[in-house]
Amino acid sequence: MICVKVNKKDVKKLLETKPLKFYTIDENSLIVKLEELPKADIEYEIVDCKEVEGKKKRGLKLSDLIKGIRSFQIVGDIALVSPKRSIDPEKLAESIMKVTKNVKAVYIRKRVSGELRVNEIIFAGGERRTRTIYKENGIRFVVDISKVYVNTSLSNERAKLAAEVDDHIKILDAFSGYGAITLNIAKIKQVYIVSGDLNLDGLYLLKESLTLNKNLKGLIDIIQYDARYLPFREKSFDLVIADNPTMISLFKSEICRVGKETIFYVLAHDNKEASNIIERETDWIRVNDYSKNLFIFKGKVRC
């Protein structure tokens, strides 16, 4: 076993030697355990491996390979990255697939846009495909990142939401997409859910996911509609879940028409602005950061 001290900028070249463990020394340097001396043309210092005894080992980070890129989202075996600066797509894909071995395809993701709430994506490297299956809270989802918006970082929020819902009620998941909220609720609660969206591709993906999840407690119906004109009678649902934070002001009246209570997700700067958008006072909970000064809030209102 050999230990060498290297500059972080040379880590990518060092990967050819199949390093075993990494230890952070300072913001510029790492100590790396190797089975043999580096073959790459880099500067390094051989050090006593006792120097890292008791130090916490760390995995190789994306920021070690590409400056300024600290994180990415993995959906199944596809990685989605939203860089804040221009970057070489090929280098990005190569680096991510070295850091995370189960990633088979890498895409750069832009902002969500349009009524169907779909990301613009740019292929960076790996396998040129957009469909995958990913697991969340014990549920398997079929998704196509070119056709639906997927945010795996909200899995805990969806689990909390499902836990808050009562059994034996009628629910409308008003903007269901590929069914992330619908399936999280139906897995653990005995409810009837109507899962609706304008995005027909998302609804077909939900239908596929239903075939992968046989032991659901809830019953689900799927319907396509424009949420400006919901095809339901007044107060048809005990609860409506309205997860469309960027466009919710367009639909709030129609959503309240068909539901007795609604859980709204709202994009706002603070609680007061969230109440102004919905035109109702409630206790808002901040569930996610959207940008530097914009946040997604969740609140339940009686309609």
Image (cartoon, rainbow, N blue to C red):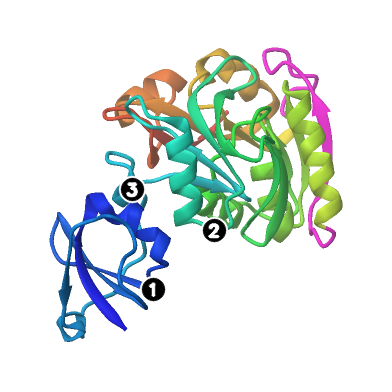
Instruction: Name the residue beneath numbered marker 3.
Output: 65
Residue 12 locus on image (x, y percent): 35, 52
Instruction: Name the residue beneath numbered marker 2.
Output: 101
Q: Nearer the viewer, mark 1 or mark 2?
A: 1
Which residue is painted at 62% across and 50% down in the image?
77
Which residue is painted at 23% across and 54% down in the image?
8
169 sits left or right of 95 in the view = right
Which residue is painted at 78% across and 24% down in the image?
200
Badge 3: how crowded within 10 Å, few (<14), some, or many (20+)?
many
- Decide whether the magenta segment is chiefly helix, strand or loop: loop
Q: Nearer the viewer, residue 183 or 124?
A: 124
Label 1 residue SS? loop
Residue 67 locus on image (x, y percent): 27, 41
186 sits left or right of 92 in the view = right
Q: Marks 1 and 2, Cα distance to the nearest angstrom?
A: 15 Å
Quadrant of the snapshot with the N terminus: bottom left
Q: Is the residue under label 2 in contact with that under label 1 (CB below 8 Å)?
A: no
Q: Earlier in the sequence, mark 1 or mark 2?
A: 1
The type of residue carrying mark 2 is Lys
Instruction: Name the residue beneath numbered marker 1.
Output: 20
Which residue is painted at 79% across and 58% down in the image?
216
Q: Earlier in the sequence, mark 3 or mark 2?
A: 3
195 sits left or right of 13 in the view = right
The type of residue carrying mark 3 is Leu
Is residue 189 among what the camera can see?
Answer: no
Q: Which residues are magenta?
A: 214-235
